[in-house]
Amino acid sequence: MSPQVALGWLIDAPWRCSSGHFLAATTAAGLGMSATSQPNTPYERDQRMQWPQRRTAQRSDAIHLATRHVCALQSARVGGDWCDVFVQGEGHTLVIGDVAGHDATAARAMMRLRRLFRRVAADTAPGAGPAELLTAVDKAMTTQGVAVLTTGIVARLSRLPDADAWLLRWSNAGHPPPVLVHGDGLVSTLETPPDRPLGIGADRPRSETEVILRPGSTLLLFTDGLVERRGQVIDDGIRSLSTTLAALRPSALRDPESLCGELFARLLPDRPEDDVGLLVAHLTTPIAPPIARPSPPAAAACG
């Protein structure tokens, strides 16, 4: 099997980001690298950066996240696929991208584009949606001369006020659609009208779609290497992914890291022909903040 990089973390409270002060979604436990990854490569150092964290006492989200990446080239530690998670305003932004190719050139383009995404996100208004972020990245690619064809998805998860639910908004730039596993085990493909990839112009607005998610839902963003095989239509690969998800035990769906491992073991050949990126987000019931209890009254003095 090709070298894999595995990351997993838990967001148990919202963090904010603003221009000049970018906050990554890391856990109190930090990022856990798998035993199969190679330490101290530039990609892993970038992934393992510990950005400043800030907790908000008003509420506590429970979003469990994990990513997994495998390179098609045995000698490579990173290819053209990437996943990222950060926070804008009140929402958690999830990004997955696939730069054309899986050689060193694609890897360099990926790392440049990933940094560009973060810079643009930090300079974008907190309330900007996924379509607006993709459009801004498109424009930045043009002005900075990043001439690389890339597919990708930007998704935003935001807690709905006074509701035990999340709002999912996403925009798709020519990428395989997200797959959603509902709390009851039903699997849905979040297909939307096709939109252009990044890197071919920003002269037209992008579309954006939204849906309400309940606790127990599991969202999967992935690159085509997970579902596309030589001689097979990609739609058949997505159906195979959906069938595999429907057959898994509920405990695997609740644990994103285990789910990544299960899917890689069941769907990938020993030597993948393409890079593979996978990002899994599982939503649980928000944890209520602890209730402050008054201290007992002081004992009355006898006199």
Image (cartoon, grey):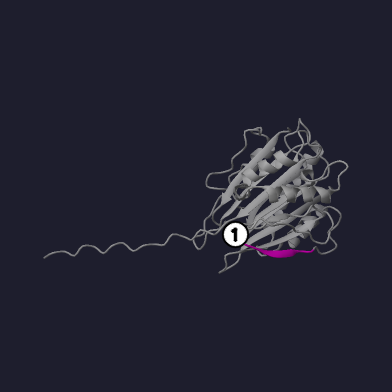
Question: Is 101 left, or right, of 291 in this rendering?
Answer: right
- Viewer-proximal residue among 299 and 141: 299
What type of secondary structure mainly makes up the magenta span?
strand
Residue at image x 63%, y 49%? 253
| Residue 92 seen in this snapshot | yes
The residue carrying mark 1 is: 215
Point out residue 91 in the picture as x, y percentages from the top left corner. Answer: 63, 60
Q: Quadrant of the N terminus?
A: top right
Q: Is residue 169 magenta?
A: no
Q: Quadrant of the C terminus?
A: bottom left
- Against 19, residue 251 (above or below) is above
Q: Which residues are magenta?
A: 207-214
Q: Residue 184, how many percent across, how many down?
A: 64, 58
**Left or right relative to 221: residue 235:** right
Front residue of 268 and 79 = 268
Residue 19 visible? The answer is: no
Q: Quadrant of residue 129?
A: bottom right
Callout count: 1
Residue 209 within the magenta-colored segment of the rendering: yes
> As rendered, which of 252 and 193 lies closer to the eye?
252
Which amino acid, mark 1?
Pro
